[in-house]
Image (cartoon, grey):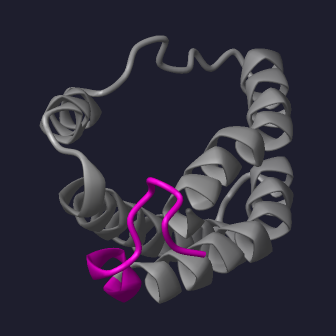
Amino acid sequence: MKVKKFGQRMVDDPSEANDELKEMASAKGVNLPTEVSAKDKILKERLSKLNGLSFDKAYMESRVKDHQKDVVDFGHESSAGADTQVKQFAAKTLPTLKDHLKEADGLAPNAKTSPTDGTSE
């Protein structure tokens, strides 16, 4: 159940930040991707074939890897970025990303024993 709750958080949390990013990109004349990346399509396909503990483990491992990269990227941008508005956005978003990473990292090892079917906490 914890993995399922984390997954729902990954749906709910980014909406405000994504809206802010879209607005900022639009104001700067930057076009954001409108489709899922090839890498994410492959991950979705792989995850769609899994269930139970194997899904939980693969999903949590992917979230840890992605959040590790995001924390590094946002940390770099927040300290060394050239655009003040983007730096501020990165700095504001970084604590949430770190929180997500901490939670994902804590759940990843437990995915071996914490199915999403509601039989665990």
Taking 33 as reference, is 43 above or below it?
below
Is 43 covered by the magenta stretch?
no
Q: Is residue 46 above or below residue 37?
A: below
Q: Position of residue 66 (x, y in %)?
A: 39, 61
**In the figure, is residue 40 to the left or right of 13?**
left
Specify whether residue 80 is in view: no
Residue nearest the observer in this picture, 118 or 17: 118
Q: Nearer the viewer, residue 68 or 82?
A: 68
Q: Residue at x 57, y 68 (%)?
A: 2
Judge from the rendering whether residue 29 lies leftward or rightward of residue 110; answer left or right.
right
Q: Please give the name of the residue rendered at 55% of the width and 20% of the height, measured from the top-left corner.
A: 32
User: Magenta span covers which residues?
Assistant: 109-121
The spot of residue 111 in percent (x, y) is 35, 75
Image quadrant for the N terminus? bottom right
Residue 55: percent from the left, percent from the top?
Answer: 25, 53
Q: Position of residue 68 (x, y in %)?
A: 43, 75
Residue 113 lies, with reference to residue 23, above or below; the image says below
**In the rendered image, which quarter is residue 53 located in?**
bottom left
Helix, strand or loop: magenta stretch: loop
Pick the quarter of the image with the C terminus.
bottom right
- Please indicate, yes or no, whether residue 54 appears anywhere in the rendered image: yes
Q: In the depicted view, which residue is nearer to us: 78 or 96?
A: 96
Give the side of residue 41 with respect to residue 77, left or right.
left
Q: Residue furthest front?
A: 119
- Residue found at x 39% / y 72%: 64
Residue at image location 63% in from the left, 70% down from the top: 100
